[in-house]
Image (cartoon, rainbow, N blue to C red):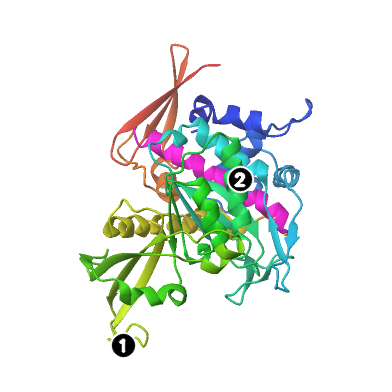
Amino acid sequence: MFDFLERSQINALIEKSFPTLANQSEYRWKDIINSMLSIYLCGGDCIEDLQIHLRGHFKDNPFVKMPSPDTVLRRLKELAVKNKQCKTKRGVITHTYNSNEFINQLNISLLKQQGVFDAQELTLDYDNTIIFNEKSDSKMTYKRNPGYQPGICYLNEEYVLFVENRNGNSDAKAFQSDTLTRLFEQLNQNGIKKVTHFRADAASYQYDVVKLLEQNVENFYIGCRNSYIAKYFTQIEEWEHITDSTNEPMQVGSIMIEPFINQAREDGIDAKPYRLVVKRKLRDDMQMDLFTDDAYEYRAILTNNIEMTPVEVAILYNHRGNPEKQFDILKNDWGWNNMCFSTLENNTVFLGLTAFFKNIYVFIIQHFSQLTDTLKPTYRVKKFLFRFIILPATWIKRSRQITLKIFTDSNKYITLSLNST
């Protein structure tokens, strides 16, 4: 695996991107990063596993020098930036957030180097998640437990593109347009202007967010709160019958509306029409709704896409469920539930770097799944660990080549050849 990181130029990217170190430094940045990556690919879940479990095994490893946990933590703190605070116009809550441009640039550089942005279509998904914790500066979330509530943007449903950490008392809706502005500015600085689809939940149903998306993406799809758009449900005349993912009957229709009329008037412009795609299915209890005078549950999507059919829009938006699964992967496979620092700004570095590891893992599993049928590109870290990392192997020296012969559980083996140097 270390050989793959070297051959694919990921180690070169690390050395080029991170701050310059003194010549007498014992550990290079690639030692720091690859040591942290090894924790999670060897079944660990905290930085202390370096000393407790791994350091002895990596003593003579030709690819990486494994530092102590204290050295790793000290280096990561050097990458932190100061928190910023703000308040809404009428609010009394102080919102604390931390946007580390260097860490986000690191992920973008990796995805550019590996050709991810060369895909025919680019789909972005933005969402927030709660990371419950009792750090020294964590605030109470709306779930009534302390924690952080970072905003994450995913690319093509599997890569982490952007991470901005927020404290727990900052809801997903507050200052979201500012967060997305920083995201698009960083993409533009990297020459990435082709975003085909952007999907988000109802927290993005804001005038400033929609206006920003109009300028930066081709098509956007935003969930809506029923309290804002329920008056349009009864105006839809044509409904198409389909089945949802659980094979339950559902109906889909659409109508053109003009939202945000008052906000547009304050800007001195006319409100723009958008398409409202509405999904509905019968309630289990058949309870009648007072406003719609029927027994349906409604879900709506605001979009500027008028070319797709309502069913195609609904199916595309339903794929938001795939990026939401990535939160579970980040929390349980890549250490987000075990943040190693006690402050928001330092933990932002940790979250961004482990997201970087998650992106690297996608390339690792894609590569090695082509070499052996015991792996599939959809496998999570645990399967990769038991089917590839923890396997019997032997080193064979032959003709100035060192070959690692790895035996799999299907009585097959693969060989990796390295130069004797």
Which image quadrant is residue 405 in?
A: top left
Establish if 225 lies above or below 58. below
Q: Is residue 357 visible?
A: yes
How packed mark 1 is, by other alpha carbons closer than 10 Å (few <14, some 14-19, many 20 or more), is some
What residue range appears in magenta?
A: 343-370
Residue 271 lies, in percent from the top left, at 49, 61
Q: Quadrant of the C terminus?
A: top right
Q: Most prominent secondary structure in the magenta stretch?
A: helix
Sequence-wise first label, 1 or 2: 1
Q: Amino acid at mark 1?
A: Met
Which residue appears at 51% of the width and 54% of the height?
330
Establish if 6 lies above or below 55. above
Which residue appears at 71% of the width and 33% of the height?
27
Local secondary structure at mark 1? loop
Which image quadrant is residue 294 in?
A: bottom left
Q: How many marks?
A: 2
Q: Which residue is mark 1?
A: 288
Of residue 227 and residue 297, the one placed in the foreground of this image is: 227
Local secondary structure at mark 2? helix
Q: Which residue is mark 2?
A: 353
